Image (spheres, rainbow, N blue to C red):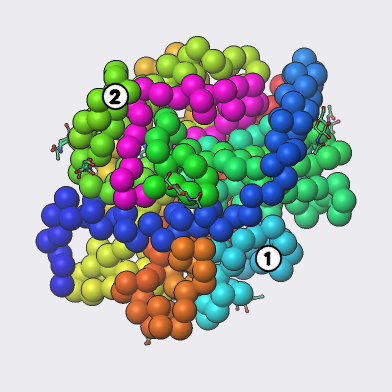
Amino acid sequence: MTTQASPDRRIQLLFPVALASLLILGTARIILDSLKNNRSQFLWQESEKHRVVRLPINISGDEIIPEGCNIFEGQWVWDNVSFPLYTEESCSYLVKQVTCQRNGRPDSNYKNWRWQPNACKLPRFNALKLLEILRGKRLMFVGDSIQRGMFDSMVCLVQSVIPEGKKSLQRIPPRKIFTAEEYDASIEYYWAPFIVESNSDHATNHTVKRRQVNLDSISKHGREWEGVDILVFESYVWWMYKPLINATYGSAQSVQEFNVTTAYRLALETWANWIETSVNPRNQKLFFMTMSPTHLWSWEWEPGSDGNCFNESHPIERPYWGTGSNLDILRIVREVLKQVKIDVTLLNITQLSEFRKDAHTSIYGERKGKLLTKEQRSDPQTYADCIHWCLPGVPDTWNQILYAHLIQDYRIL
Ligand SMILES: *[C@@H]1O[C@H](CO)[C@@H](O)[C@H](O)[C@H]1NC(C)=O
Ligand SMILES: *[C@@H]1O[C@H](CO)[C@@H](O)[C@H](O)[C@H]1NC(C)=O
Ligand SMILES: *[C@@H]1O[C@H](CO)[C@@H](O)[C@H](O)[C@H]1NC(C)=O
Ligand SMILES: *[C@@H]1O[C@H](CO)[C@@H](O)[C@H](O)[C@H]1NC(C)=O
Ligand SMILES: *[C@@H]1O[C@H](CO)[C@@H](O)[C@H](O)[C@H]1NC(C)=O
Ligand SMILES: *[C@@H]1O[C@H](CO)[C@@H](O)[C@H](O)[C@H]1NC(C)=O
Ligand SMILES: *[C@@H]1O[C@H](CO)[C@@H](O)[C@H](O)[C@H]1NC(C)=O
Ligand SMILES: *[C@@H]1O[C@H](CO)[C@@H](O)[C@H](O)[C@H]1NC(C)=O
């Protein structure tokens, strides 16, 4: 029993488990590279054109989130009538990494839980309304593979209402771009595991062990984010390899070891400066998602046990916070967002996801771009992925929350 793992040990442990799946982009085919320039030009022009005309949407009374309702406080309730919002079969865009059922997961209850805030109801996800909001716009998720899961989820949530031939998915590393042609809309993913620049930025060939972060460099990424109408940022697990991280700050030549919390704060400040100089709050919206929790040590929710998320089939139903979700990092996020002069909405999903020890890909995902072998599956202690999530699953709820924010923002007043 490892009840007394030291904080340092935890930080070290977090990453190796993540490693395997973080590398998954390595298998993504690099296709359509020649379209890169044409495509981005096209998107730019389109969003310029439409920016002037904002198309508000009509939402009904029960879709309005009353002031005073904290949608992040609540509980998971069993709802096998409305959930899941789509199936593995109905969304051909899902990658093997997340299709847990197809990969052999025997239980499926993890798909049937609905997040119920204490003081109000979350609006039901309506793909047509979201597409109306996204008309002529770009929605971009920026971050690591957790964000890629959220992107995949969003694509699945909207794609079913778009006819064949009017939708497409392109991989143009470091981006993935889903296009809804009739709406001139795109939902995109941008690989930037530290948000700021680093030597792990190559989408398919990133160094993992000898990572080095450039805490004050963001302009290369920033150029790709400029003008994007709705940006959703996230970055956490890549920082959590060791208590110290190699980084540059001030001088690009001088690499130093930084305390991870110090480094994270400097990186977020760099990002905040970028926002203040490059974002136009009148027609761009920003979100920052708090860390996605991990469930690497079952003794945390079941004292005396010595496993991980493997074989967990039920959410935690009492107050719970795992040690993998670093409170210093959360405090830094809150402080930096408070100081930044442009409105950034916090998607405070950590606590609600903490309850979902049952919803990770576990042994029903991929490692280094391949499904686990039989031998690996028989050793969940080593091979279970308790960081990433099955789809349909928890990231759908994050998107439902993002959607709830967006319909409030774009509604007819
Ligand atoms: C990209 O645009 C150039 C010139 O604008 C054109 O020659 C080329 O064929 C285009 N490539 C694709 C893949 O559409
Ligand atoms: C909004 O919807 C309500 C009820 O569905 C309808 O009565 C109203 O006319 C609509 N308003 C606009 C501006 O479309
Ligand atoms: C996030 O929500 C939780 C409740 O779910 C709350 O306790 C916490 O203070 C919130 N964090 C921030 C940064 O707002
Ligand atoms: C939904 O859940 C209820 C209660 O657990 C169960 O009785 C019912 O058979 C389930 N329905 C489906 C379609 O799975
Ligand atoms: C990946 O990157 C490393 C270091 O930059 C380089 O040596 C190697 O050739 C690259 N591999 C591929 C397949 O591009
Ligand atoms: C930083 O880089 C040096 C030189 O490559 C290496 O010896 C050291 O272990 C690295 N530190 C961390 C925290 O990774
Ligand atoms: C890193 O900084 C935090 C906050 O200042 C501190 O609590 C922690 O002990 C430091 N860790 C190391 C390894 O120096
Ligand atoms: C999974 O958990 C159940 C009890 O919930 C137990 O009966 C079963 O043996 C476990 N399976 C494995 C492979 O550990």
Task: Determine which quarter of the picture holds residue 358.
Answer: bottom left
Quadrant that contains the C terminus:
top right
Q: Give the range drawn in magenta.
A: 208-235
Q: In which quarter of the image is ligand 8?
A: bottom left
Query: Residue 17, how many percent across, how many down?
Result: 34, 61
Label 1 – label 2 distance at C-alpha: 49 Å
Quadrant that contains the N terminus:
bottom left
Please state which of residues 412 and 249 is positioned toward the viewer in this rendering: 249
Dot 1 or dot 2, earlier in sequence:
1
Residue 204 drawn above or below residue 188? below
Of circles 1 and 2, the one toward us is 2
Query: Residue 202, how many percent across, how many down?
Result: 49, 42
Q: Mark 1 points at which residue?
A: 87
Q: Going 77% across and 15% down the picture, which residue do you hit?
A: 52
Q: Going 65% across and 42% down the picture, which residue do you hit?
A: 172
Left or right side of 213 for 120: right
Query: Residue 374, how many percent across, how many down?
Result: 45, 83
Q: Going 52% across and 68% down the picture, which residue do you hit?
A: 370
Task: Determine which quarter of the picture holds residue 281.
Answer: top right
| Amino acid type at image mark 2 | Gln
Q: Mark 2 points at which residue?
A: 253
Residue 189: mark in rendering? none
